[in-house]
Amino acid sequence: MDPQTLVLIVSVLVVVALAIIYFQIKKLLDSKSSEAYFKRGKILLDTKKDDSAIKDFSEMIKLNPKDGRAYHSRGLAKLKLKKKKDACKDLKKAGELGYFDAYADIKKYCK
């Protein structure tokens, strides 16, 4: 691996780590921030920490049970963990709450 590629990889890892730290601090400062849970959950999902992402999306749902994004994202995380039945429940709930992007995933994964 050439040095430039290595520097790029390390830089990306540092940015991801800093983003996680930022949202950890944000969560501590504002424990009622459903948006902080959502953003950190998305980062965890993108970095393949699916169980942790599900926990954050579940916390978001507790704080804001009418936000379809949380159900959609939690459903996608559950799909990654091969929990199709639970994932499809979350995706359907997201659609019911008006998060219409969920319907494409329902069509794709919930047959």
Image: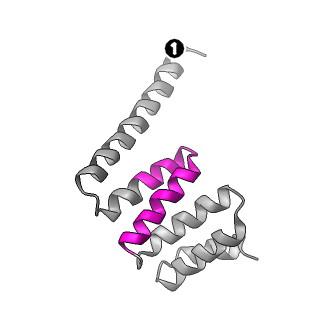
* Relative image position of residue 30 (x, y in whole percent): 24, 57
In terms of depth relative to the viewer, which is nearer, 43 or 105? 43
Q: Is residue 34 left or right of residue 41?
A: left
Which residue corresponds to mark 1? 3
* Relative image position of residue 93 (x, y in whole percent): 55, 80
Snapshot quadrant of residue 61? bottom left
Mark 1, other Cα within 10 Å: few <14 / some 14–19 / many ≥20: few
Rendered position, 27 above or below 65: above
Rendered position, 35 above or below 52: below
* Helix, strand or loop: magenta stretch: helix
Q: Which residues are magenta?
A: 40-64
Q: Secondary structure at mark 1?
A: helix
Residue positioned 46% across, 68% down in the render: 70
Q: Is residue 80 left or right of residue 40?
A: right
Residue 59, magenta (yes or no): yes
In terms of depth relative to the viewer, which is nearer, 69 or 58? 58
Q: Is residue 102 left or right of residue 25?
A: right
Rendered position, 86 above or below 7: below
Residue positioned 41% across, 79% down in the render: 66
* Relative image position of residue 69 (x, y in whole percent): 46, 70
In terms of depth relative to the viewer, which is nearer, 98 or 35? 35
Residue positioned 46% across, 83% down in the render: 98
Looking at the image, the residue that sits furthest to the left is 29
Quadrant in which the N terminus appears: top right
Q: How is the image coloured?
A: one colour
Looking at the image, the residue that sits furthest to the right is 111
Residue positioned 41% across, 36% down in the render: 17
Rendered position, 81 above or below 3: below
What amino acid does circle 1 point to? Pro
